[in-house]
Image (spheres, rainbow, N blue to C red):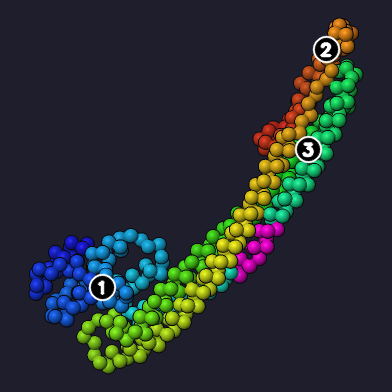
Amino acid sequence: MVDAINGNYGSRSQDLSINWNDLTATEVLEYQDEGQEVPDEILAWAQEMAATDLADDVTYEMSESKETESSGNAATELREEMTGNKMNLKEQGEAFIEESRNKENLTLQSITEMAPLLSAAQQIGNEAVAIGDETKTQLDAIQAQIDALINEKNDKPRFLQSRSERGELQGLQAVAQALGAGAQNQIGGLDAEIAEIDAIVNEAAFTSQTSIDFGNETVEIGNTLMDTKKSLMSMGQGMLNGSSSYFIFGGKRVGREAVEQGARTTAIGEQGLEIAEQTAAANGIALDSVSQAAGGIDTTTNGSSAGDESNSSEDTNGTENTETENASNASRRERTAEEELDPTLADTSITTDPDEILRRKERRGLA
């Protein structure tokens, strides 16, 4: 675009040796004062740039290179768009006052919405710790009962072990499994609450930063409007004295309002951003608590076992006891047959795997 401008308008200049792309705003306006015919687009850029602190430092080509990169700042982009549409600084000031006021109201709404979230995040963290501690205590107690039953069973031959003992172990196992799954569901609910808080805080932080950007831009426009010389330069050359006077006084009024509104919008934005950062930090701590609780519950649940170890059928002297072996074989055949009829008897390990839990429920006819 730079080359095209230079090529299209070069012949219109009285001095064909002038390369408008390499000139700063101040240099462009000096040439205009000398009577040179300046390309329209470059003149509009120079008049706008003259109202900033970069008038003596940035060339047109440098400015065009910057414009190809998105600033990510909505306020800056809006002002560039207004400048491109030939809006003068006073009109821009009036527009930015309204935009800043709107951004301020949005940020105030975000602050109101975030107000209860800081304590909510802290409460979630505390609740996660409580769930983890309580569940571990209960699972440890169940594991102690399981260990006691296993030790009791191992103290006598297998043929003397009853189905009721095996059933008691399986019952404790089922309780531990249900307890772990229930605790994980509770933790999952807390995790969803954290995600919801995170979404609100991120949106509020974005809104607050946007207020800061618009507030700063509005203040900058206001300060420029309150500078008579810069205000006139931003309006361009050839203005009538009457319209110049009207612009000066009207521009200063708009400038004062822009500075006041912009400063207020910036302050509200900074307040919102600070609250968002504090809430995000508390939410991060809560997330750590939830993750640690979930991991602790999973470890404790999977660490519980209801192994069905029994004593050997050999006698204490190492001599095989045929009667005991036959009884044990009969017991094993009986249990194998029972498991074929009732596969749930084969579920001898605690699991929190949802798929495995579903399969076991299906085998029991509960799903």
257 left or right, relative to 321: left
Q: Which residue lies under the disc numbered 2?
A: 329
Position of residue 184 relative to residue 264, above or below, is above
Magenta stretch: residue 246 in it?
no
- Which residue sits at x=49%, y=73%? 266
Labels 3 and 2: the sequence-earlier one: 3
Q: Which residue lies under the disc numbered 3?
A: 176
Q: Which residue lies under the disc numbered 1?
A: 56
Compare residues 147 and 160 and report the one nearer the observer. 147
Q: Examine the rendering and report whether any part of residue 300 can be seen.
A: yes
Position of residue 188 relative to residue 36, above or below, is above
Q: Amino acid at mark 1?
A: Asp
* Residue numbers of the magenta segment: 112-123
SS label for mark 2: helix
- Which residue sits at x=30%, y=82%? 230
Labels 1 and 3: the sequence-earlier one: 1
| Residue 126 on image: x %, y % | 72, 55
| Residue 294 on image: x %, y % | 68, 44
Foreground mark, 1 or 2, reads: 1
Labels 1 and 2: the sequence-earlier one: 1
Q: Amino acid at mark 2?
A: Asn
Q: Residues under labels 1 and 3: Cα distance? A: 76 Å
Q: Residues within 10 Å of mark 3 (few under 14, many from 20)?
A: many
Q: Residues under labels 1 and 2: Cα distance? A: 100 Å
Q: Amino acid at mark 3?
A: Ala
For the C terminus, give its image quadrant. top right
| Residue 164 on image: x %, y % | 88, 27
